[in-house]
Image (tube, rainbow, N blue to C red):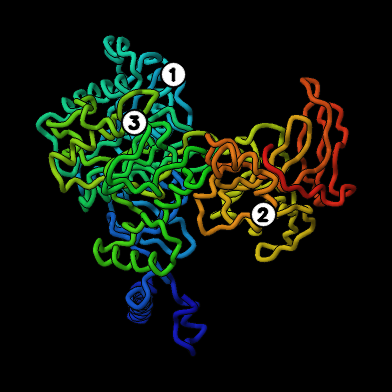
Amino acid sequence: VFQVLPLGTSTTLLENITPSSVLNTSVWRYHLLTMANAYAVIVVFLISFFNLIAILNPSSIYTWKTNGVDPYVPPFVPSGYKDDSDIDLLSSRRMLVLPKTKAPVDSDYLKNEINNTVWFAGMTRDASVIKNDIFLHMIKLNCIANVSVHILTTLGIADCMEKYNKIRNGVYRKKKCARFDVELEPDEASLISNRVERIAYLRDYQREKLRKSFGAALGKDDIIIIADIDLYSLPSVSQVVRESNHIAKFHKHDALCAAGIMHRPFGYYDTFATVLLPDTFVYPVQGRLSGAYYSGENTSLVRSKDVYGEFTQWDLLEYFEKGGIISDDVSSHQNRKKQQKSFFGTTQEDMIVPVKSCFGGLTIYSATKWFNPHCHYNMNITALSRYANKNDERPCEHVVFHDCLIKNDPSTSIAVHSFLRTSWNSPNQFGSRLAAGPIDFALVTHFKRKNRGDRLANGKFILRINEKGELVVESWDNEASSKIFWKANSYTGEDIKSWTHMVLIVKDDGEVLLVKLVPNSFHAHPNETFPESFQSIYSHLLKNEGLHLCDKNRDICPLVVWSSGNRGPRGDHYSYALVIGDDGTLKVLEEHSDRTLWSNEISNGGRSLKKWGW
């Protein structure tokens, strides 16, 4: 009251003011009205200011998250969410996200604005041993995104439902969850001996079960998510919901496959299910039932016989990451991005590569396409024998199903989303220690992706194979700069320019080898001149194997370019490991006795070699 009275008001007046008299005075009413008007002006000004800035630069003040039309930003975790915990903020309303706040995800329009039906379908031998992360993934979809779940299994139904009900009645007791069905496989499936035929039969069986669930209510925006639930990991719930929304709302693709990855060796996993456009089966020729290429294939996109060969699954993953481009030419990649953006109207499509078939451990389908009555997973496969492998003597069930969908409707769009990622196995986190073991447990660097190669790390020190193919310990004083702390005295093999991978391996006797993997045949790289010394040293191979540097049945030869020079006793009582210390020193330790077999402090960099073989 004292603050709003005019200056000069007498103290006598103040002393005579009571609450009732104040409220009845015109002066008080005047000042109340003045204050209200002032606050109203301030509020209107702030709203106008924020709206004006938003018009000029929307991203600088706030971001409107509207149902599925916000910009899409790669990779791994798309824009708008950090992890699956954001799902709890789902809402069908438009939300104002102020700076420095966690952006909500409005992917709940699966059941609100679009009002469609979504099913997640998976199969497993034993439902009681589904990995916890995968199980929670399904429950989040079920109880937060309103996605119904159907699991087909042979064992563990009671344990699975007990686990589900415990989580649902605990964490999600206030949520309205969708259906969660776990059913037994039909008995006749056990009579099918062929692995792929059995899987195809079960997929058709599950498909008919879900068809009955939809009945006559099947809508054009309905979605089916098919997943392998025995994987190491699936894409985040947020991303699965988001991609389902894109299919349901924009109808640009009928099937969107994950780019499933594997570790040790690293790369794109699901080659058996993948056929590129116009018709290239990426599965290695040596594993095919025919044992040969077929007419029309782009042979440069077929995986090499050796997993560390000239075209590996790492190369195939890079092909998808680049939007289906083989060339490393940056300008051609940028031109393609511009073409795609103008054609599709969204940069999301630059991460999506149309194919003839794929799966990747998780595929999101338009339900109307998936329920095509003319197509099945277990159809006549005679005409598709070129896609058969030796082990199963038939093509993958996904290749069969997708081939039928395309033949029934040539406009069918099937694609791989390069940043919708599943993982088949666990990545090997080396930390500061590399144990003795085969190549699958070694430090590996790919010649195109040296900056993504394996490494050992301790504090600010890192052991890696650098861009020159040198084994170095680097000191990182900050994120922007590094310097070489130690370098092996290795022969880098620069006169052999064509190499696919370099490998650092610890042998079972404690010797550490740096190996360069190079193409076997001289004919593979006609523009490359091999040193005369190689031709003289390996003349017996060239004579007997016909211009091959090692066993002619191999497409890659290991060239040992450096060795630590130490060798300890072999046997079950000995265990060796290469360790990097927090001071940058390297040691080969016999771990049972903690004895140092080799150290870069006393070795002067080891021995430079130039020899074939391990």
Residue 127 placement: quadrant: top left
Q: How far apart are the alpha carbons under marks 3 and 1?
A: 40 Å
Work out whether mark 2 precedes mark 1 in sequence or the reverse, and give the earlier one: 1
Identify the residue at horizontal 37%, vertical 75% (top origin): 57
The residue where tag 1 is placed is 128
Q: As shown in the figure, which amino acid type bears the numbered disc 2?
A: Glu
Question: Which quadrant of the rendered structure holds the C terminus?
Answer: top right
SS state under label 1? helix
Camera-nearest label, 3 or 1 = 3
Q: Exactly how many numbered labels are in the figure?
A: 3
Question: Which SS class for mark 3?
Answer: loop
455 in relation to 390, above or below: below
The answer for how far apart the CA atoms under marks 2 and 3 are is 38 Å
Residue 450 is marked as none
Residue 407 left/right relative to 101: left
Residue at the image point whose x is 87% and y is 28% from the top:
593
Q: Position of residue 435 (x, y in %)?
A: 71, 34
In front here: 177 or 356?
356
Q: Which residue is mark 2?
A: 532
Mark 3, residue position: 290
Question: Which one is in front in this view, the residue at disc 2 or the one at disc 3?
Answer: 2
Farthest residue to the front: give it.
Answer: 543
Label 2 SS = helix
Gap in Å between the C-alphas at discs 2 and 1? 62 Å
The residue depicted at 49 percent of the width and 78 percent of the height is 2
Q: Is residue 515 left or right of residue 592?
A: left
Q: Residue at x 80, y 21 (%)?
A: 573
Residue 138 image point, x, y percent? 38, 32
> Residue type at mark 3?
Ser
